[in-house]
Amino acid sequence: MSAGLLAVIDMQRVFAEPDSPWAAPRYAEAAAGVRRLLPAFGDRVTFTRFLAPAQPEGAWRSYYDRWPFALQPPDARLWSLTEDFAPHAHDTLDATTFGKWGPDLARRLAPASRLVLAGVSTDCCVLSTALAAADAGVEVVVVTDACAGADDTAHERALRLMESYGPLIRLTTVTELLAETG
């Protein structure tokens, strides 16, 4: 079975650093899973970054009223990929939206039809990306132990929701995926 494209969602400082308002408590565990996946995908890896828009519009205005710390330019330290991933990020995709599925990611996926997702946060950017890609008819595989949520409950709820989209979305573990693609 083809490995497809691995999209590593938002492994950034803003989600890794414990003092960040958006810290994912199990970031380090998800990062360990991602590191195990990288060799299996070679150059078929895209790292994404969530960024604040220069000027929030619509409902995003209320969102950034709640999280004003995040209104920083794209080159701000909080938006950087963490040190363990920056050297591997030969292909990056920046977006001011939670979901990363769209024409840019679709072009990177082609000609494969399998999108493998890992990263943070399970209950926000991973979920939004998975649902949109599945709705577009893409085979989506979410690597559960290479993802982390805002907390354990949110992570589990998001996984259960994505599981309900089967067979469009399939959940697996790092070990299972590596055995399948190896």
Image: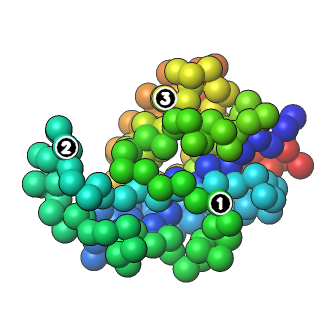
130 vs 9: above or below: above
What's under tag 3, amino acid-wise? Ala
Q: Give the residue number, with chain letter if any, for mark 2.
A: 57
Name the one closer to the observer, 83 or 73: 73
How was the colour assigned to the protein in this rendering? rainbow
Across and down, in percent, residue 78 comes to 36, 73
What's under tag 2, amino acid-wise? Glu
Label 2, residues with CA under 10 Å away: few <14, some 14-19, many ≥20: few
Which residue is pictured at 36% across the width and 50% down the height?
A: 96
Q: Is disc 3 placed on a helix, strand or loop? A: helix
N-term-proximal mark, 3 vs 2:
2
Name the one closer to the observer, 128 or 180: 128
In the image: residue 41, left or right of residue 51: right
Across and down, in percent, residue 138 comes to 64, 26
Q: Is residue 20 visible?
A: yes
Across and down, in percent, residue 130 comes to 52, 34
Q: Give the residue number, with chain letter if any, for mark 3.
A: 132
Q: Is residue 33 visible?
A: no
Give the spatial CA distance, label 1 vs label 3.
21 Å
Which image quarter is the N terminus in? top right
Tell me if label 3 and label 2 are in contact, CB under 8 Å: no
43 vs 110: above or below: below
Label 3, residues with CA under 10 Å away: few <14, some 14-19, many ≥20: some
What's under tag 1, amino acid-wise? Asp
In the image: residue 91, left or right of residue 153: right
Q: Is disc 1 placed on a helix, strand or loop? A: loop
Give the spatial CA distance, label 3 vs label 2.
21 Å
Q: Give the residue number, with chain letter if any, for mark 1.
A: 91
